Image (spheres, rainbow, N blue to C red):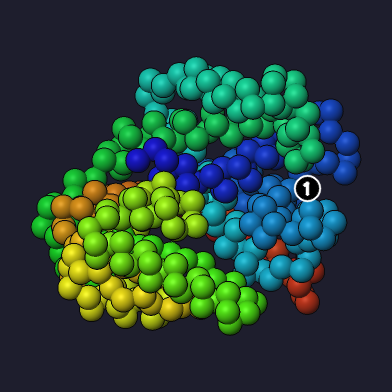
Amino acid sequence: MRTILLTFFAAILLAATATATANNSSQTKEEQPGEIVAKVNGVPIYEKELNESLALRFKKKKAYGLNANTFRQGISHAIQMQILNDLIDSAVIYQAAMSMENPPDVEEQVNQKILSLASTFGSEKKYDEFLSTKDTSLENKRAYYRKNYLVQAYFDRKGLTSPDIPEDDIKALYEQQKEGFKTPEQVKISQIFIKVDKKLPPEEKKERKQVAEQARKMLLDGTNFSDVTSKLSETTDLEISGGDRGYVKRGLLPQSVDDVAFSIMPWKISNVIESEFGYHVLMVSDKKPAGYSPYENVRDFLLRYLETEAVRENVATHTRELREKAKIEILLKKEEGNTASKTGKTETNTGS
């Protein structure tokens, strides 16, 4: 379930971590974190974090050449609040993870992850240079993965990541989604194919058909498909496979060929069939009627889906519980006409 958690919180944690060094004393005035837009148990969330999260979510910061502050001015207060609430969720979860007794040492995991990523660039230095082109750094990446692994360990300890899915629930989902596992009618065919260019004059086209007729006669006389294919078929993949096309679903072949393939009796040699591509001679060796993929074939897929949904719900429920206990101050000021207003309303949740 660790990959599930990474998917849930990657964007939030990345945005929050991207500005984790916002208070660094070496920053210029332009790089300062700005006003505080919320507090979670007294810990501030800065305007810069919100701006970076908005830019990350909409992926327009680079595309339109806008800096985060300019970009934010075009976003409604309601959407800003959605992103801010994501940051608050991230904060209450991270604070809870930090308060674990005997927290795990995640540095080895972080180092291994960074080494793995850096190896594709040749060195950590080159990886850091690449990250600088993406407005981040190796330090921020380390902080991001440090948070992720700590949060994952916290969820594991809380038992949120190992849901017990009853077999009956998996079977019930299979019945609900059964139409999605429907398999079309299929036939297993061998084919002789004589290609005909549309621009060929009638006489040459007639000669090509005669080759197909010759191939059919050889098959009727007892020559096996592989020998006829290697002698007369001009399609390399058919020559290699001895004319065996394997199982083909209804509707994938040219219409004229499809009609014959799904009506001919097994082991009978078809007449020469003309299609827009050339001439075909078929033999069907097996037929599979339309039906449904067996439960056993799709059970693991359904189980993973139900586990993912269960983890999502577990985490969402636990996050709500953490928020209810936290002291949350919303300081984001509502704007007039979509720009920052100094008459914004402050909302405070004092928790329980």
Residue drawn at (63%, 22%), measured in percent from left and top? 119
Q: Quadrant of the image for the N terminus?
A: top left
- The reply to whether residue 294 is in sight is yes
The answer to whether 230 appears left or right of 146 in the picture is left
User: Please, what is the three-letter code of the amino acid marked with disc 1?
Assistant: Gly
- Residue found at x 41% / y 69%: 212
Q: Residue at x 46, y 74 (%)?
A: 209
Q: Quadrant of residue 280?
A: bottom left
Residue 260: image location, x then y, percent: 30, 78
Q: Position of residue 348 (x, y in %)?
A: 55, 58
Image height check: is 102 above or below 159? above
78 or 344: nearer the eye? 78
Q: Quadrant of residue 270?
A: bottom left
Residue toward you, 8 or 94: 8
Across and down, in percent, residue 165 comes to 18, 50
Q: Residue at x 63, y 32 (%)?
A: 141
Query: Label 1, on which residue?
Result: 34
Question: Which class describes the residues within 10 Å of circle 1: few (<14), some (14-19), or many (20+)?
Answer: some
Compared across the picture, whether 198 is left or right of 299 comes to right
Q: Is residue 352 visible?
A: no
Foreground: 32 or 274?
Answer: 274
In terms of image quadrants, where is residue 145? Answer: top right
Say which element carries label 1: loop
Relative to 243, does residue 117 appear above or below in the rendering? above
In this image, 199 relative to 40: left or right?
Answer: right
Q: How many marks?
A: 1
- Counting from the top left corner in percent of width and height, residue 311 is at 32, 49
